[in-house]
Amino acid sequence: MTAEPVRDIGYAAWYDPDAWMETMDGPRWHTLVKSENKRVADYAKTPEVLKRLTKFNSLAERGHVLSQISPNFKSGPVNISPIGSIFIRWNFESSRSQHICRDVFGDSRGAWSIRDVGDGSELYQLDYTPLNKENPIWSLKPVGQYTVVAGQRCYYLGVIKKLWYNELWSCNALTGQNQVLIYKELDPEIVLEIVRGPYNKIYMTQERSQDLIWWEVKDDKIIQATEPEGWNKLRIKRTKGASALKKENKTLINIPAGQITVDEWSAHSNESALNILVEQPHQAPRWYRYTNTNIITALEEPTKSGLKLVEGQTTNGTRYVLVSKEELQKPSNVLVIGYGAYGMPTRTSYARAMWNPLIEEGWAIAYTFLPGGGDDSEEYAKQARRTGREKTINSFLECIHSIKNTYNLHPRNIVIYGRSAGGLLIGGSIQKYPDGSLFGGVFTEVPYLDELRTTTNTSLPLTQLEYNEFGDPSHRLEDFLSVGLLSPADAAVGLKTPNIFIYVKTAINDSQVYTYESVKWIKRLREASPTGLPKILKVNYNIGHFTPPNLLVSSSAFDCAILDTMAEKK
């Protein structure tokens, strides 16, 4: 179905002249991508950007160092430390050799880890490394993102269609042999996941757009179960972006924004105490220790971050927070960040790691807690699915209005940002304010933009898995009308945006949102507004949907240099 210019779904058909891009192959495609990268490279050589890059590289490095987290999670003899939102760094206690992976599980025999061996394309491989050895002695691929070991068996997920983890397998933990298929999911709208439960229990979940069915995994069989209680009945509760760690009705930790992460490895092993990581956008990461006698203590003294957090709320109740330098009275510019999808909490913990050059230049970073995201109740997340997507966009725009009025900012001093599914949010916001009267700059990474073509193409990895999130236009007229009106790549045709500076970044190996979506969108925006502020697209090679740890500093410096220049343009 991909690359056919006419999409016919029975009751509707339409023509896409840029459908040829969807093959992402051939001389015409490669020439186009090269021309986009040359446009970005030429812009990066302008005096305005160059003068920032030299300074911003050191500021980005400093931000990266300040946000580094020392390993305090443990799985047997394995030290574990998170890097960003998905990567993990691990090492054996007796070794300094560090490894980067997606997931890891350790015991007295060694470490079982999952890593991407496809240059960011999410081709995951399961490795077993014996204790204090440098290299794995067996590997399996392709597999899912998570693994756990019980006795002589190692459990992992199988994948037949890209990103659809629909099989539960086990194998001999020490040899990788004697593989057993425990369960196979046939419904293309359901994805499986392995969960390390408390008290050494292992669970499999079937997820259909945030709705879960739980199964306990035991002796290569599954038994239907209820959702397990957390270790010692700990719960993390979110309310409009604020988070609290609770033990029944008692609050142990309460933060205005950020992430609370309980040591799931120790919880699984039923340790007598757990380490808890607290990450806030305006403070350095901090570790706590919690015992089963209900005593919680900080493992170290808080370090000064030099940042402050200011809370805000729109008239309709949408909450947001701004992070800036402690002494700053009024920001020179504001980067407004939004997501609001999949019931996923807003990741506010990387203000320094991602945006330190901007913060040091007097910017504020605003995080918005929108319907559709996991920053409040389950109902708050589900109300923005499918035809409710407009609620997310309107709430985001209300936050921007509030920030603009509170700080008396010119639109050119406001830049909006969204990545992945946040591309729909950014695209929808531009449709409502294409004249630049509310914001003057846009930055979006690996954005979901070609929504109508994607939701009607079942050959793509995530389409059927996301019907409940974004809609099924092929079978529901209501979804067709909703998606058709909001799909940014389609709305871009003829959309006049001369007063908005647009910077897009995508990746060739992205398996979740294909590169052609960004290329279509930027091409159409530029054709509709051939003059005015720049519209530039950077296509990264050899990476995928997530920026690997070794590129975080250079990526931050480059992006911030572009954004700081954006806000200076009139």
Image: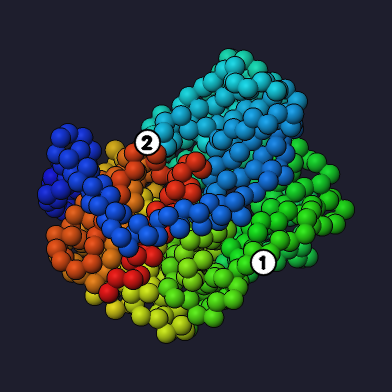
Q: Which residue bears the numbered disc 1?
A: 255
Which residue occupies the foreground of this view, 222 or 144? 144
Residue at x-position 47% and y-position 68%: 361
Disc 2 marks a residue whose amino acid type is: Asn
Residue 50 visible within the image: yes
Q: Which quadrant does the N terminus fall into?
A: top left
The residue depicted at 23 percent of the width and 56 percent of the height is 522
Which image quarter is the C terminus in? bottom left
Residue most extreme to the right: 293
Q: Nearer the viewer, residue 209 or 231?
A: 231
Residue 478 visible somewhere in the drawing: no
Looking at the rendered structure, the secondary structure element under dot 2 is: loop
Report, in whole angstroms, how far the alpha carbon at label 2 lies from the one at label 1: 38 Å
- Relative to 306, is 298 on the left or the right? right
Name the residue beneath numbered marker 2: 542
Q: Are marks 2 and 1 in contact (CB under 8 Å)?
A: no
Q: Amino acid at mark 1?
A: Ile
Above or below for 89 versus 482 = above
- 554 vs 227, left or right, is left
- Identify the residue at horizontal 36%, vertical 41% (top origin): 510
Q: Is residue 13 above or below residue 165?
A: below
